């Protein structure tokens, strides 16, 4: 029964909330009625049995709960008038995606909302996380997170943000914004920050993957959606090997590759190959997924095709000439041309990345490999001061303490 309830929540929450939001034009009503329907399932299914069509049962129950609430508030006519906002849109051309959940995702990720608000609202309305779970994930009080989500829903209503899929002209830019929200959710779990947090937050990485799977199901032809899903899978596949038993980060070159999730890696590789087969120019997430495919294809770290990694980063730099991308390219260049060349490339980024812990960690590793121990220790100190992940800090401290010994090992990613 617990499995059935968990599966129903995972599969049906977003569908129920989205349908109610479309029907009533009110995210508050949609969220509360859906929550009441799932609470009713927890109470009734153990006694009555799981219905043959759990989704239909939940949808019907939630719809009745919403009607009951409108009646209790004696505002049915007013709410129904507001609901027409959701319907007031121009006719859509054939083939445009109409799934209600997609409308909900684009509403929660609307650019009129602050990024932190988009994340919280997406986790609540689409992912089905409780307010308490979201608050814990982002290290804020539950009451503060509740106010944040309430303000977001109020802004959507007050600003009359339309509950619809963007038109063809706006869709690419808006999809980019949605993917940024999903990637932020995943990244916060992948390298969790803040005192007292686990170094890896599986709840957030899982939420990021599940939300991206949903978007992929709704937009199967979008290359960047597929690329982001592949990137997440190939990254999450390494989770069991990324932190040691004493809670220290294990970098990619030192990980036990036998502990990687072979199923996730195979799925990620299939997605990457499918995108390559289209012959279309790849976007940012597709290139990053391809980089991870190269890493996870190597049986041993020494077998990594670093020349291919450099070539992929060359593509990415042309697409996204940001300092962070250039830093990652410098790390790959160091594996092909040596640490001195990589360090020179990294040092050119110092002004832009001085406040970024990974820049100093990269310099520290390259300086260590060059036998420049004093400079390496200074760079490690700077990286430790800026880092926020407990496992990464533990790794950097150990490296700093042993930085007087130059070796061929390296901190080449995690």
Image (cartoon, rainbow, N blue to C red):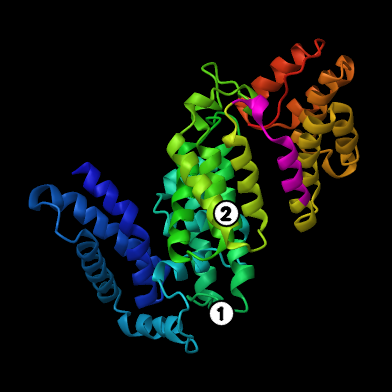
Q: Position of residue 111 (x, y in %)?
A: 62, 67
Horizontally, residue 171 falls left or right of residue 212, namely: right
Which residue is under mark 2?
227
The quarter in which the C terminus is drawn is: top right
Q: CA distance from mark 1 to mark 2?
A: 22 Å
Residue 75 in the image: above or below residue 274: below
| Relative side of 178 to 18, left or right | right
**Residue 54 location (% of width, % of height):** 21, 59
Reply above or below: 353 against 45.
above
**Which is more toward the observer, 323 or 312?**
312
* Up-down relation of residue 60 to residue 6 (above or below): below
Residue 118 visible within the image:
no
Q: Number of marks in the image?
A: 2
Q: Nearer the viewer, mark 1 or mark 2?
A: 2
**In this image, 247 relative to 394: left or right?**
left
Residue 343 place in picture, x, y as percent? 87, 31
Tag 1 residue: 167
On the rendered image, what quadrant is the N terminus found in? top left
In percent of width and height, residue 66 lies at 28, 70
User: Label 1 neighbourhood size at 10 Å, few (<14), some (14-19), many (20+)?
Assistant: few
Q: Disc 1, disc 2: CB below 8 Å?
A: no
Residue 146: in magenta span: no
User: Which portion, as a residue range, is magenta?
Assistant: 300-314
Q: In this orientation, which residue lies closer to the viewer: 148 or 404?
A: 404
Q: Name the residue at 14% across, 58% down.
A: 51
The mark that comes first in sequence, 1 or 2, is 1
Secondary structure of the magenta portion, mostly? helix
User: Residue pushed farthest bottom?
Assistant: 91
At x 10% / y 51%, what residue is drawn?
Answer: 49
């Amino acid at each position: 029964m617990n499995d059935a309830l968990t599966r129903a929540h995972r599969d049906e929450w977003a569908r129920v909330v989205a349908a109610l939001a479309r029907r009533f034009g009110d995210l508050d009503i949609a969220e509360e009625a859906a929550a009441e329907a799932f609470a009713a399932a927890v109470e009734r299914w153990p006694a009555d049995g799981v219905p043959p069509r759990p989704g239909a049962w939940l949808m019907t129950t939630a719809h009745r709960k919403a009607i009951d609430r409108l009646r209790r508030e004696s505002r049915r006519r007013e709410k129904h008038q507001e609901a027409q906002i959701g319907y007031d849109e121009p006719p859509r051309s054939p083939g445009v995606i109409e799934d209600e959940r997609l409308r909900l995702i684009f509403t929660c990720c609307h650019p009129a909302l602050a990024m932190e608000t988009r994340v919280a609202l997406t986790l609540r309305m689409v992912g089905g996380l409780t307010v308490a779970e979201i608050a814990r994930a982002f290290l804020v009080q539950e009451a503060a997170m509740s106010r944040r989500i309430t303000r977001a829903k109020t802004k959507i209503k007050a600003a009359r943000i339309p509950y619809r899929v963007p038109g063809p002209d706006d869709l690419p830019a808006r999809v980019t914004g949605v993917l940024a929200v999903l990637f932020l959710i995943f990244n916060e779990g992948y390298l969790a920050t803040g005192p007292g947090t686990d170094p890896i937050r599986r709840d957030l990485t899982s939420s990021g993957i599940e939300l991206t799977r949903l978007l992929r199901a709704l937009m199967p032809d979008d290359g960047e959606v597929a690329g982001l899903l592949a990137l997440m899978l190939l990254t999450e596949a390494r989770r069991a090997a990324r932190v040691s038993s004493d809670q220290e980060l294990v970098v990619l070159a030192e990980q036990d590759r036998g502990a990687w999730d072979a199923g996730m890696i195979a799925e990620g590789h299939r997605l990457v190959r499918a995108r390559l087969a289209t012959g279309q120019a790849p976007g940012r997430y597709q290139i990053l997924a391809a980089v991870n495919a190269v890493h996870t294809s190597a049986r041993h770290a020494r077998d990594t095709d670093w020349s291919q990694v450099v070539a992929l980063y060359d593509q990415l730099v042309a697409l996204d000439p940001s300092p962070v991308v250039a830093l990652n390219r410098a790390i790959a260049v160091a594996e092909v041309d040596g640490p001195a060349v990589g360090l020179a490339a990294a040092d050119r980024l110092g002004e832009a990345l001085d406040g970024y812990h990974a820049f100093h960690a990269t310099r520290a590793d390259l300086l260590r490999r060059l036998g420049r121990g004093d400079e390496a220790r200074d760079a490690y100190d700077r990286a430790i001061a800026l880092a926020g992940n407990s496992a990464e800090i533990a790794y950097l401290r150990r490296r700093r303490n042993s930085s007087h010994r130059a070796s061929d090992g390296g901190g080449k990613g995690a």
